[in-house]
Amino acid sequence: MHLILKPLFKAELSDDFIDILRIKLLGKEVSEGERISIDILGKSLNFEVVYAEPKTLKVRENTKIEISSSLNPCIELEFEKKIRELIPFPQGFVIVFEDEVLIINQKGHKIFNKRFENLKEVRISGNTVAVIYDEKKLALIHVS
């Protein structure tokens, strides 16, 4: 789970501030695009949720929280596996791992994810992702 908040006020925020945000948001549900208010020392601080994966999430201790002051936030995704190939297409990106295919939209939200035994090749035609695996099998994934 990943959350990027944009402050709707002018102030320098330290890295320690993320820990305070996590404590204040723990257990609360937030949605991408929503404006949230956090009370700190009797003062309300407003933030916009510029990115949430999933789009609506309940904040937990392991939720990755970032603060972005940029109008165009940089969304960095980190995976446990090595990326073998990245294939762009109009709806987003296909990320190919050794034995898995992940399709994300342009904001980084998961559209599709599946493991394929003996993954051989991935190709795209229009809005269809073709996966060749297990020597004789073909999976056609339609993305809208």
Image: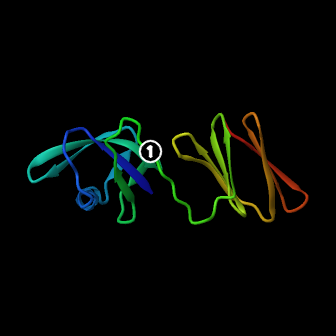
- Residue 80 location in percent, x, y? 57, 66
Answer with the quarter of the image where residue 51 lies: top left
Q: How many marks?
A: 1
Vertical position of residue 43 compared to residue 19: above or below: above
Quarter of the picture containing the N terminus is bottom left
- Residue 94 location in percent, x, y? 67, 47
- Residue 13 location in percent, x, y? 22, 51
Tell me: 85 left or right of 18.
right
Tell me: 36 left or right of 52.
left
Q: Amino acid at mark 1?
A: Cys
Give the camera-side residue of 52 and 66: 66
- Residue 2 location in percent, x, y? 43, 54
Residue drawn 41% across the image and 37% down it:
72
Vertical position of residue 144 compared to residue 122: above or below: above
Residue drawn 8% across the image and 50% down it:
42
Give the camera-side residue of 141 and 89: 89
- Dot 1 alpha-carbon crowd within 10 angstroms: few under 14, some 14 to 19, many 20 or more: few
Q: Which residue is mark 1?
A: 74
Quarter of the picture containing the C terminus is top right
Tell me: 35 left or right of 89.
left
Residue drawn 35% across the image and 65% down it:
61
Q: Residue furthest right?
A: 136
Q: How is the image coloured?
A: rainbow
Give the camera-side residue of 72 and 101: 72
Residue drawn 31% across the image and 42% down it:
69
Name the secondary structure under disc 1.
loop
